[in-house]
Amino acid sequence: MTAQHTQAIHVRGLEKSYGDLRVLRGVDFTVARGGIFALLGSNGAGKTTVVKILSTLLRADAGTAVVNGFDVATQAAKVRESISLTGQFAAVDEILTGRENLVLVARLRHLRNPGTIADDLLRRFSLTEAGGRRVATYSGGMRRRLDIAMSLIGDPPVIVLDEPTTGLDPQARIEVWQAVRELAEQGTTVLLTTQYLDEAEHLADRIAILHQGRIIVNGTLAELKRLLPPATVEYVEKQPTLEEVFLSLVGDGGSGSGSGTNTTPATTSAPARTSKEHP
């Protein structure tokens, strides 16, 4: 299989300026089909600019970008048919119910059986029980999951998530993470932009760090960790992480219903081997 068929996104030499401000200074990366690729960077690094170029909302000054085999500059309509973009804030209608939001989008896309499509997505994202409720009553995590579900109507092969967990509480973030993992497991290619280090660490197959308009490193989590000096090994008592404490008290949060807590306290495990960097 050729590289063109194994790559869902191929970016080379992207440049973009706003007046004298150079936002992108030659960005290069590729995203494999069916993988989760995290574009990591601080505010102002250029992540959203990359997303806008890939989704044909903005034209690059230089460089090329190919999405699902189509050039974003010369085949914009084909690119838009191939992707779905979920922005930083949930684009849902709070007056409608969750199911009505999904049916509306399916009808706008002129798809057959919009009700069946809506019911399937509600089930896929654990929102069936909430489907008949107005979205105004949803939690932040439920709204974001509904927003992602709406993005999948029409089965786009590539979905772009621009900082999908910004402003969400810890339990809502975990719900969205689970939804993103399931997308990749079912074959959807995910390009994720985030400024949260733990989000990239938990989700991504590959991570690229965008800094001052350039990709300064790109690799798997293991490859990135090897960039640091070798570690020494010491024996220390392993303490539970804050995430383990949180989940032991409130449950895994996977259903988004807010019920079903686990009151078993977190306990300290036996001494374990951990690593410590050289000073």
Image (tube, rainbow, N blue to C red):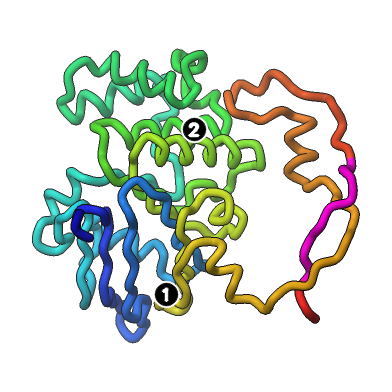
**Mark found first going from the N terminus, 1 or 2:** 2
The residue tagged 1 is: 215
Q: Specify the quadrant that holds the C terminus.
A: bottom right
**Mark 1 and 2 residues: CB-CB less than 8 Å, in contact?**
no
Residue to which mark 2 is pinned: 143
Q: Position of residue 51 (x, y in %)?
A: 34, 59
The vertical placement of 258 against 223, above or below, is above
Residue at 48% across / 40% down in the picture? 181
- Circle on res. 227: none
Could you tell me residue 193's position as x and y percent? 45, 57
Residue 154 is left or right of residue 174, and the answer is: left
Out of 220 and 20, give the one closest to the viewer.
220
Closest to the camera, between mark 1 and mark 2, is 1
Q: Is residue 14 above or below residue 240?
A: below
The verdict on residue 270 being magenta is yes
- The kind of residue tagged 2 is Arg
**Which x, y percent locates residue 270?**
89, 45
Mark 1 Cα shell of 10 Å, populated few (<14), some (14-19), many (≥20): many
CA separation in Å, label 1 and label 2? 32 Å
Q: Picture coordinates of residue 107 (x, y %)?
A: 21, 24
Describe residue 270's horizontal placement relative to residue 110 as left or right: right
Residue segment shown in magenta: 268-276
Query: Which quarter of the figure has residue 254?
Result: top right
